Amino acid sequence: MIIDGLQYANWSEKIFRQMRQGGVDAVHVTVTYHETFRETVLRIEAWNRWFERFPDLIFQGRIASDVALARATGRTAIFFGSQNPSCIEDDIGLVQVLHTLGLRFMQMTYNNQSLLATGCYEAEDMGLTRMGREVVAEMNRVGMAVDMSHSAERSTLEAIAHSTRPIAITHANPAAWHAARRNKSDTVLRALAESGGMLGFSLYPHHLKGGSACTLPEFCQMIARTAELMGIGHIGIGTDLCQDQPDSVVDWMRSGRWTKAVDYGEGSAAAPGFPPMPDWFTDNRHFGAIAAGLADVGMALDEVAAVMGGNWLRFFETSFGPERSAP
Amino acid sequence: MIIDGLQYANWSEKIFRQMRQGGVDAVHVTVTYHETFRETVLRIEAWNRWFERFPDLIFQGRIASDVALARATGRTAIFFGSQNPSCIEDDIGLVQVLHTLGLRFMQMTYNNQSLLATGCYEAEDMGLTRMGREVVAEMNRVGMAVDMSHSAERSTLEAIAHSTRPIAITHANPAAWHAARRNKSDTVLRALAESGGMLGFSLYPHHLKGGSACTLPEFCQMIARTAELMGIGHIGIGTDLCQDQPDSVVDWMRSGRWTKAVDYGEGSAAAPGFPPMPDWFTDNRHFGAIAAGLADVGMALDEVAAVMGGNWLRFFETSFGPERSAP
């Protein structure tokens, strides 16, 4: 079983077919960044048209058992997520509305301060806001996973502590391996694991030691070392694959409508666009290489299976349904 | 079993308890008139809060079997509807989005011309528009019932003919009984019945012969005569109960944002507000009186049961699921 913890591709029939060729059973896809609620709904409408056009390749995933349905019917289950809370505007009622429309992950922040928490590019980190605490509780209630991939350290630790359900960092790597601002400290990773949460290892070059030149063995050794830190049950893949996207999209991700200037984020004026992916992972057909690479660095087959999809499936099972009453 | 084909009350715990006291298993409730999509979502959010607050009284109905669930658990299933297509704006993709959020009925028009069809107060009736034909097909596909209660005659006949599924007139009476502009000709009622559609008999005084003074036997005799015209299988109740609403609401219904003046609709400058309901039907506890009245005018018990809920249940069964492929 293969589950990818995050992608934001320029979706097309080609990519959906590559998902099938790669045996990808489920993907958490980003549907929105800085979009308002209405704009987010337009993105969901576009997905509805893809689901209608390609019913033999993809369908909308809503509950964990849709992963089994995907396997049984030879398709890929698409689970929606947001990389910023712009989609709920200032309205906590939109959490349930978007959950009904299929949103299963929402980041508290995308790099900047949001109404809910502090992003990893701010100079100060105030932790969860008043609304942030309310929204985490509402996400817990309806079954929407809190994602802190782009959040700052204190905010992330507070989200872990405040959430009554395990949370996720769907796409990032350990900062101890590569000290990017988006990568996470051992303190965060330990707290995440102790709370039952999940880390998805990113293949976005800015998150990799050596960038685009990072080798498959280096990536897999990093995963094996992180398994020692976090435990084998709390790690998965979150490729952050942005296949076929024009550079205008990374500009939208970074600059949205919050600045009139250009924010280069993890890039730079000299390299403002999407960096090239490592040559051993450029599309959905290449998950097998990662599985083989993990075995090559000494992981047992059941551990490889857990990292490639089993752990995300368990996280889906405990995250997407309504909150259980206390016993 | 009791199913009401339309209500738009000023919802409260009192009314939800009256639904239980009256043994009402399901109600099609209006959630929106002239509201934009975003404003409609705010109305749905308000319902989500009621569902969360009163889970022992009400829950959201989505499929026909929710009526059985309501009976089994002693609650009322609430099915959403819109009295105007403002909620889809100019965007056909919002049909599926609103269906996902639970919308199960949508009127093509509310008195005026809409983007889809002509309302019953226009001087000219152009029938279904280009977008109207597309939206009816999309509603057929996803499982949202077309409601022509406030539409003009030609538009209604074209909707009946164009729709691949039976449609509804959820709240109106025969014009032959009372020649109100909102009541329907025998031509429409026959075409509706022949296509498998449903008429819900309205208790809104402007639709009643004699208005608020209409007696229960007169109302029930009218139903019995309409059964002869349409067949017993195509009629139900659609009270149009607007309990506890302030008159500002009927002004919104009639004038929305389309006029700076006041449109009195079925009312008048002398009587601009909600008319008083007949004294034998003022809230949800009074459905039993209608059932008894139908028996008193000679209807068999199985016919009474069909009119009070059985026919709406069958309509729900064929209307709310995804379209079946041709055999």
Image (cartoon, coloured by chain):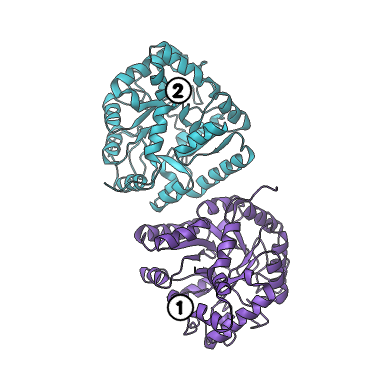
Chain colours: A cyan, B purple
Q: Is residue A269 above or below residue B203?
A: above
Q: Is residue A270 above or below residue B224?
A: above
Q: Quadrant of residue A296?
A: top left
Query: Which residue type carries mark 2?
Result: Leu
Crowd rating for badge 2 (residues with CA inside 10 Å; few <14, some 14–19, many 20+): many
At a point 57% along the width and 58% down the height, the residue shown is B317
Q: Secondary structure at mark 1?
A: helix
* Same chain shared by disc 2 and disc 1: no
User: Is residue A195 visible in this depiction of the protein?
Assistant: yes
B289 and A27: which is toward the camera: B289
Residue occupying the point 55% across, 27% down? A243
Residue A110 visible: no
Q: Chain of mark 2?
A: A
Above-or-below relation of B176 to A92: below
Residue A133: give x, y in percent of width and height.
Answer: 30, 46
Q: Position of residue B301 (x, y in %)?
A: 55, 75
Between marks 2 and 1 in the image, the one whose residue lies nearer the viewer = 1
Classify mark 1: residues with Cα within 10 Å, few (<14), some (14-19) or many (20+).
some
Q: At label 1, which amino acid type do we have?
A: His
Residue A54: x and y in percent read 62, 37
Q: Is residue A108 left or right of residue A6?
A: left
* Side of B220 where A193 appears, left or right: left
Instruction: Tell me if label 2 and label 1 are in contact, CB under 8 Å.
Output: no
Q: CA distance from mark 2 to mark 1?
A: 65 Å
Question: Residue B95 at what x, y percent from top left?
Answer: 58, 53
Q: Which residue: 51% across, 49% down?
A: A38
Which residue in the protein does label 1 denote? B286
Residue labelled with disc 2:
A203
Label 1 chain ID: B
